[in-house]
Amino acid sequence: MPDDRVDVAIVGGGPAGLALAHSLKMRKVVVRVVTPPATWHATYGVWRDDVEECELGAPLDTLARGVWSQVRVVGRREHRLRRRYLVFDNERLRRSLADGIDVIVDTASSAEHDLDGTTLRMASGGSLRAKLVVDATGNGVLLAHRAGLGRRSNGHGVARHGEGAQTAYGLVLGNSHHVEPDVFTLMDWRPAGGNAAAPATFFYGARFTDGSTLVEETSLYAQPPHNIEDLRKRLALRLGADFTDTARAVERVHIPMGRSLPARTTRVVGFGAAAGYVHPVTGYSVAGSLRAAPRVASAIDTALRRGEHGAGLSQTAWAAVWPEPLLRTRAWHEAGLAALMRLPSHVIGEFFDEFFSLRTELWAGYLRIDTPPEHVRAAMLGLFARADWSLRLRLASAPGGLLRALAAR
Ligand SMILES: Cc1cc2nc3c(=O)[nH]c(=O)nc-3n(C[C@H](O)[C@H](O)[C@H](O)COP(=O)(O)OP(=O)(O)OC[C@H]3O[C@@H](n4cnc5c(N)ncnc54)[C@H](O)[C@@H]3O)c2cc1C
């Protein structure tokens, strides 16, 4: 006999798993999280207004490591965006979301389903019985296991690029003059050391209130991924020296991207990066997971109260994880990525000049995974309208790209 039983078992104690657990607990759903000891190492940056309404368990600014009122983007020209950017204090956010949540420190190895629910088997030999199991493992180990690695296209006819990654090489330094205080540099596309080597990569950097500075050389999604050692060399060119040996910490970023969405028919339901919440262009997922947690928790809570179970309960949860309109949003994002990837390196800065010259609600909407599809389309059309003829021609020739947006009603 299984040793324990809950409404929802969440596998994975990253930001997505804990956000969903927290929102379920707020709705009095009996939830348990299965995760190895979790330390969050990455830098989690978000646009502050994207997450100010989220269920975080504490006032947003008490969970921040830094908040900046200005964001700097440099393409061919410099933009000062008056939209606040926030980097979480990982430990404070983790503790706040995990407060009062039952956690089993273990690794889930498989899930066995019957008509009523699921038995989760752990590496330690233990088991947990749940009405619903959520895979928030980042890479979707249980989804792949159940679906026989059966990922498929999102069904919207958009050209796919295959699995690649966003990569970056970052250093945490002391107070560094390479970064302007009080301004978050999100992207500086000027070539490292004036050397316009292709493909283009960009500089990202900010100074924190504790006096530390994060500097990073980043590649957007690439297939194959941009080599991290090359990013290290480019960062050294930018800074005038390689500060790796004296840095307080080194951040090697590899964010897998370009996967199709999971099948969304499995009994185990995905959430967070495991469910494809990584934005196809930016590589971000944390704000997307925090914003989706209340929606998904409410749907699960309502379904449980209605007595849904087994496959029906899973289908209800999947429909909240990926509501139909947001699948169309995803298709537009992938069309945008297709267009961006066709651009030669020397034009990418110009592309972002036009993007960040759009009205704030247009570019801000494009950067969220839960923006209504018609708003994402409007942003793409807006960018097309602003671009000069040579950029338009390049964008329009992308397969499944902006021409589709123009042709669609
Ligand atoms: C250096 C770096 C910087 C980044 N910067 C940003 C940023 O600024 N903004 C942003 O939004 N995103 C950023 N990202 C991307 C972001 O980190 C991920 O998209 C995000 O962590 C995904 O959250 P998640 O909870 O879905 O999955 P994860 O964070 O991957 O968490 C998954 C959890 O599941 C656990 N797990 C795995 N397998 C099992 C198993 N079998 N049983 C039990 N537990 C299991 C893991 O131990 C882990 O704790 C960055 C990534 C990196 C690497």
Image (cartoon, rainbow, N blue to C red):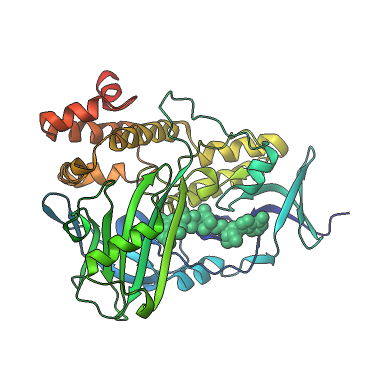
Quadrant where the image shows the N terminus: bottom right
Residue at the (50%, 69%) spot, across then down: 96
* Lateral position of residue 35 relative to residue 387, left or right: right
Location of residue 164 in the rendering, given as x and y in whole percent from the top left corner: 45, 43
Q: Quadrant of residue 386?
A: top left
Location of residue 63 in the rendering, given as x and y in whole percent from the top left corner: 40, 70
Tell which of 356 and 312 is nearer to you: 356
* Lateral position of residue 209 relative to residue 167, left or right: left
Location of residue 218 in the rendering, given as x and y in whole percent from the top left corner: 33, 56
Q: Is residue 260 visible?
A: yes
* Lateral position of residue 35 relative to residue 262, left or right: right
In the rendered picture of this protein, how many numbered marks are placed on residues? 0
Rendered view: 307 above or below 36: above
Residue at the (41%, 70%) spot, across then down: 250
Q: Quadrant of residue 107?
A: bottom right
Location of residue 134 in the rendering, given as x and y in whole percent from the top left corner: 63, 49
Tell which of 393 and 182 is nearer to you: 393
Q: Quadrant of residue 234?
A: bottom left
Q: Residue furthest right?
A: 1
Rendered view: 23 above or below 65: above
Tell which of 46 and 28 is nearer to you: 46
Quadrant where the image shows the C terminus: top left
Q: Is residue 53 visible?
A: no
Rendered view: 374 above or below 287: above
Tell which of 32 and 104 is nearer to you: 104
